[in-house]
Amino acid sequence: MTTNSNPHTKEQAPAFGMHERHLRRKDGNPLYGVPAPRYGIADYLQARRLDSEELNDFQGEMQTVIQQAINLPPNAESEVVLELRGKLDQLYTRCSGFDASCGSHKQAIRKLIEVVMTAVWQASAGDPMARMELEQEEVARQQHYCLLEYPLISDLMRPDTPITQAELIPTLLQAEEDELEAVLWLFEPEQLDDIRAQASELLSRLQGEGHDLPEAWENLQAIIEHIETEL
């Protein structure tokens, strides 16, 4: 679903990075302010420049980490191995914020993580407790991969996300149905209660100002139902 009615963005190919993606969310959308913000060609060019710079930075860092993985000695200390895996996890999150053209990068990162984790598994061969923890971690990692299939989740998980705290509620209220359901699992019950209250206040205020946003109201109902299922 979308509340974005900007005719200049509907026919474009999907944004390949988080800055243009967020600009499209806000463009012509009263959830982000009244009057609804409008952006021109210069704004989109700036967002695409930032996304291009981000992609170039990512590719450079990926090459560095790949070289570190290649040079990793068989008897590397566990701290070194886990640090490398952490870098790969961060790269995967960053890569998930780009469009499908970076799918090969994601596959390469996952294969590298498997290679790195092989050393960790071998080191835990005689420790049943350590192996159980690794199995649980692997399940969590696969769940994490599934969540990162939604670009919004990647955007929200970035420390440099373009989505400000003030824009979180509008962003959730304009999200696609399946995307919203996935995102809600990122929040604690107390946070969800706060999100529900803020979303209700925002929509009630906009309704009083003459803005009919049925799809945003549907998202609020989905948030309420999610909270109820967690009780």
Image (cartoon, helix red, strand yellow):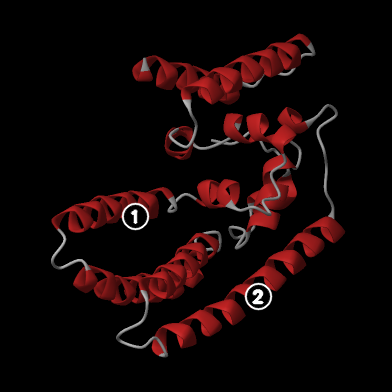
Q: Which residue is mark 1?
A: 141
Q: Residues within 10 Å of mark 2 (few under 14, many from 20)?
A: few
Q: Residue at x 64, y 22 (%)?
A: 213
Report the front residue among 100 and 69.
Answer: 69
Circle 2 or circle 1, nearest the eye: 1
Q: Residue at x 53, y 63 (%)?
A: 99
Q: Residue 75: x, y in percent?
A: 31, 84
Asked which secondary structure carries label 1, the reply is helix
- Which mark, by number, is residue 163? none
The type of residue carrying mark 1 is Arg
Q: Residue at x 64, y 29 (%)?
A: 169
Q: Residue at x 49, y 71 (%)?
A: 102
On screen, residue 158 above or below 107: above
Q: CA distance from mark 2 to mark 1?
A: 24 Å
Name the side, left or right, on which 190 lies relative to 126. right
On screen, residue 170 above or below 212: below
Q: Residue 191: x, y in percent?
A: 55, 25
Q: Which residue is mark 2?
A: 57
Name the side, left or right, on which 165 lies relative to 36. left
Asked which secondary structure carries label 2, the reply is helix
Q: Looking at the figure, which quarter contains the C terminus?
A: top left
Q: Earlier in the sequence, mark 2 or mark 1?
A: 2
Q: Residue 24: x, y in percent?
A: 69, 48
On screen, residue 103 above or below 200: below
Q: Are marks 2 and 1 in contact (CB under 8 Å)?
A: no
Q: Residues within 10 Å of mark 1 (few under 14, many from 20)?
A: few
The type of residue carrying mark 2 is Asp
Residue 29 image-quadrant placement: top right
Name the side, left or right, on which 117 lies relative to 29. left
